Image (tube, grey):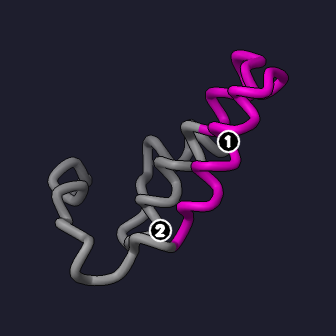
C-alpha cells in the first residue's frame, strides 16, 4: 500500500507536504465521505491546494524533525 510505504519512508522534499494532503483525501475516500457533497467539496479544496503553498517563504521545514536518519 502506498500510504503505508510513504508513512514508513517519508519523502525528503517539499513533496512530503503534498503527500500529507493526499493522505487526507485518501482517508476521506476510505471512510466513504467523498460520496457526499461536503466530502467531495473537501477533496476538491485539498486538491486545489497542491503545490500552491510550496514556495520557500511558506515552508517551515518542521516536518523534517520526524525523519529517520
- In the foreground, 60 or 41: 41
Is 59 on the left or on the right of 12, as rendered?
left
- In the foreground, 31 or 41: 41
- In the foreground, 26 or 65: 26
Q: Residue furthest bottom?
A: 56
| Residue 37 drawn at (x, y percent) | 79, 27
For residue 62, above or below residue 13: above
Report helix, strand or loop for mark 1.
helix
Distance from disc 2 to disc 1, alpha carbons, whole Å, reads: 18 Å
Boundaries of the magenta span: 25-51
For residue 47, above or below residue 34: below
Is 62 on the left or on the right of 4, as rendered?
left
For residue 22, above or below residue 57: above
Rendered residue at 70%/16% (across/down): 31
Can you tell which quarter of the image residue 26 is in? Answer: top right
Q: Residue furthest top?
A: 31
Magenta-colored segment: predominant secondary structure: helix
Rendered residue at 56%/64% (across/down): 50
- Classify the position of the N terminus by image quarter: top right
> Which residue has dot 2 on it?
15
- Classify the position of the C terminus by image quarter: bottom left
> Which residue has dot 1 on it?
43
Amino acid at each position: 500500500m502506498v500510504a503505508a510505504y510513504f508513512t514508513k519512508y517519508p519523502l525528503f522534499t517539499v513533496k512530503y507536504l503534498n503527500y500529507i494532503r493526499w493522505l487526507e483525501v485518501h482517508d476521506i475516500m476510505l471512510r466513504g465521505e467523498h460520496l457526499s457533497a461536503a466530502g467531495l467539496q473537501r477533496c476538491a479544496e485539498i486538491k486545489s491546494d497542491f503545490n500552491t503553498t510550496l514556495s520557500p517563504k511558506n515552508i517551515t521545514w518542521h516536518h523534517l524533525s520526524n525523519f529517520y536518519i
